Image (tube, rainbow, N blue to C red):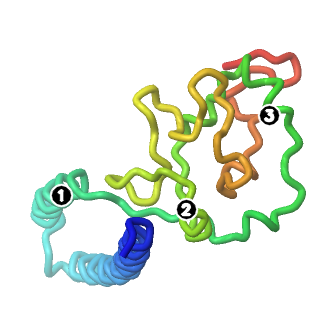
Amino acid sequence: MDDSASRDDVEDGLRNLLRNLIETRLVQADLGATLKALVETLIASGALEPERFERRRKQTLDTAVERLHTRPAVQFGEAVDKYALEDLPQIDCAGRLPICQARCCKFTVCLSAQDLDDKVFNWDYAKPYQIRKKEDGYCAHSEAETHRCSVYGHRPATCRTYDCRNDRRIWIDFERRIPA
């Protein structure tokens, strides 16, 4: 078996595993809603003291939050056909890159299953399926000198549809070319 075939198998298996994890989290959300309704009913009936419950809830929440910080969160990008998208923002990115320094390439971008199937993206194994970032905070596919996208033809739907014109993180005034 060659390396590319085994990597494909591993990525397909990991993707399936993480999809199952997402489904499990939906079940957990339903369970949480059920427990919340039960607790509210017990408090309303007087069978449970609110202060005592809140103290225990806070202790349990603190423990759960600590565990969440040590485990990766799985996020997929929007499930759309990025190659069929129409009416995309018309922005002269190449002409503005020297001014804005591609600030948008520092945003967190989650890859879709279609992006993963393209097999051109470097994603962060600690944060499936977010595009990996370099030490400087830029996307792994942002070229160091120019900030041009090295996978532009395959870029995710998030990147294709993003419109920086009214984003105050990027521009104070888009038309006058005043960066944030």
Q: Give the mark, 3 or 2, whose residue is nearer the N terminus.
A: 2
Near mark 3 (Cα within 10 A), the count class, few <14, some 14-19 or many ≥20, is some
Q: What residue type is labelled 3?
A: Arg
Provide the residue designation for mark 3.
Answer: 165
Q: Residue at x 35, y 60 (%)?
A: 73
Q: Residue at x 82, y 18 (%)?
A: 177
Front label number (1 vs 2): 2
Q: Which amino acid does label 1 sit on?
A: Arg
Q: Give the mark, 1 or 2, whose residue is nearer the N terminus.
A: 1
Disc 2 secondary structure class: loop
Provide the residue designation for mark 1.
Answer: 67
Could you say which is closer to the camera, residue 169 or residue 135?
A: 135
Residue 89's spot in the image, x, y percent? 85, 46
Above or below 161: residue 93: above
Question: Which quadrant of the view contains residue 100?
Answer: top right
Provide the residue designation for mark 2.
Answer: 119
Q: Which amino acid does label 2 sit on?
A: Lys
